[in-house]
Image (cartoon, rainbow, N blue to C red):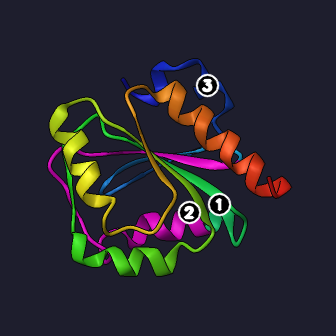
Amino acid sequence: MSIVDYPYYQNLIHKQTIALGNLYFFKKFVVCEFKEGVNIDFDNFNEAKTAIEKQFGSSYFGFVANRIHSYSILITDAPLFNEAFKNLKAYATITYSSFSSQVFEIENHFFNFNRQKFNELDAAIHWVTQHLEETATGF
């Protein structure tokens, strides 16, 4: 289910449509809903990277990958993503199929972010916001 169908959507600050899909910016995190079948690499993620940097600057932020569509990430670019997003403190992925869930487990071996997998968007947003609060207070 898309973020637009959730009550939390009323807290939206800004929506940006990019070549890869839609970015929904909230106060401390971004929800990304990428298009069906896109292949994400560090180069074509630049438009999203620029939007994220504009929104959050050097502040800590969270990333919620709402995988309502199937897409792929070039795993060999993981070190570039790890280096580019040092202020990313919570990365939640919502998986809607066993295949997406298995892909998440494989990706976990390559990304250095604090990543968690969820079956529903509400739980993912709760975890991201809670983790960001704990990071800010040092607990």
Q: Nearer the viewer, mark 1 or mark 3?
A: 3
Q: CA distance from mark 1 to mark 2?
A: 5 Å
What residue appears at the point 63 percent right and 36 percent down from the top-left corner? 12
Alpha-carbon distance for marks 1 and 3? Answer: 19 Å
Q: Earlier in the sequence, mark 1 or mark 3?
A: 3
Alpha-carbon neighbours of circle 2 within 10 Å: few (<14), some, or many (≥20)? some
Q: Position of residue 119 (x, y in %)?
A: 37, 28
- Looking at the image, do the residues carrying marks 1 and 2 touch, with CB atoms under 8 Å apart? yes
Residue at 20% across, 45% down = 102
Using the image as rendered, state which of residue 129 and residue 36 is in the foreground.
Answer: 129
**Residue drawn at 59 percent across, 52 percent down:** 62
* Residues rendered magenta in the picture: 28-53
Q: Real-space Cα distance between discs 2 and 3?
A: 19 Å
Disc 2 or 3, which lies upstream in sequence? 3
Which quarter of the image is occupied by the N terminus? top left
Residue 63 in picture, x, y percent from top left:
52, 52
Q: What amino acid does circle 3 point to? A: Tyr
Q: Which residue is mark 3?
A: 8
Q: In this image, 114 relative to 39: left or right?
A: right
Q: Residues within 10 Å of mark 3 (few under 14, many from 20)?
A: few
Disc 1 designates what residue? Answer: 55
Q: Which mark is residue 52?
A: 2
- Tell me residue 18's x, y (percent): 38, 56
Please tell me whether mark 1 sits on a helix, a strand or a loop.
Answer: helix
Q: Residue 139: x, y in percent?
A: 79, 52
